[in-house]
Image: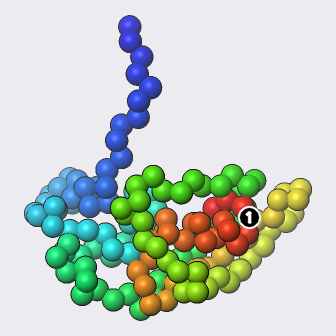
Amino acid sequence: AKASFSMATRPSVVTWLKDLKADEGTPIRGGNFWTPVAGATEVDDSGVVLLCPKSQTDNIFVDAASFIAVAGNGEYLAPPPKRKDNVINVPKEQVEMEIYSKVRKGRDGDSCQTVRVTVTETAASGSSIVQHIQGQFADGV
């Protein structure tokens, strides 16, 4: 008997959406022409994603994007994304953070914050704000 510990490859957001819609009976044609621009652009992200034809990405302007995240997981930091071609670089001056709540009870020296992150005048993704949050709070998301 042979054992394999390799993980199955993760689909892109567009591939996942195409598969989902095909299973529902409404196939999407031309998936190679679409790209995620902002929001939940990675498979591990959750929330809304902005998809657009690849040929039209220069015509998209995102006024603002807001994200809610929880910072405080015992200082386990998420590594930077492996694929650099998909990373949206968000300048620090366009990121605004607001703490919604803080939990300390029962967390012995490891508080947990719910943070709202607003990015203005640029497209942003869940992956692109993680490093900003971890830098601000010196804790993982």
- Which residue sits at x=89%, y=56%? 108
Q: Badge 1, how many Cα within 10 Å: few under 14, some, many 20+?
A: some
Could you tell whether 14 is left or right of 79 in the image? left
Which sits in the foreground, 122 or 47? 122
Compared with 45, 19 (above or below) is: above
Compared with 57, 24 (above or below) is: above
Query: What's under tag 1, amino acid-wise?
Result: Ala
Which residue sits furthest top?
Answer: 1
Quadrant of residue 26 within the rendered picture = bottom left
- Give the tally of numbered discs: 1
User: Which percent across, then down, holds residue 104?
Assistant: 85, 65
The C terminus, quarter of image: bottom right
User: Which percent across, then down, holds residue 68?
Assistant: 58, 74
Q: Which residue is mark 1?
A: 138
Could you tell whether 51 is left or right of 67 in the image? left
Residue 28 visible at all: no
Compared with 63, 35 (above or below) is: above
Which sits in the foreground, 81 or 52? 81
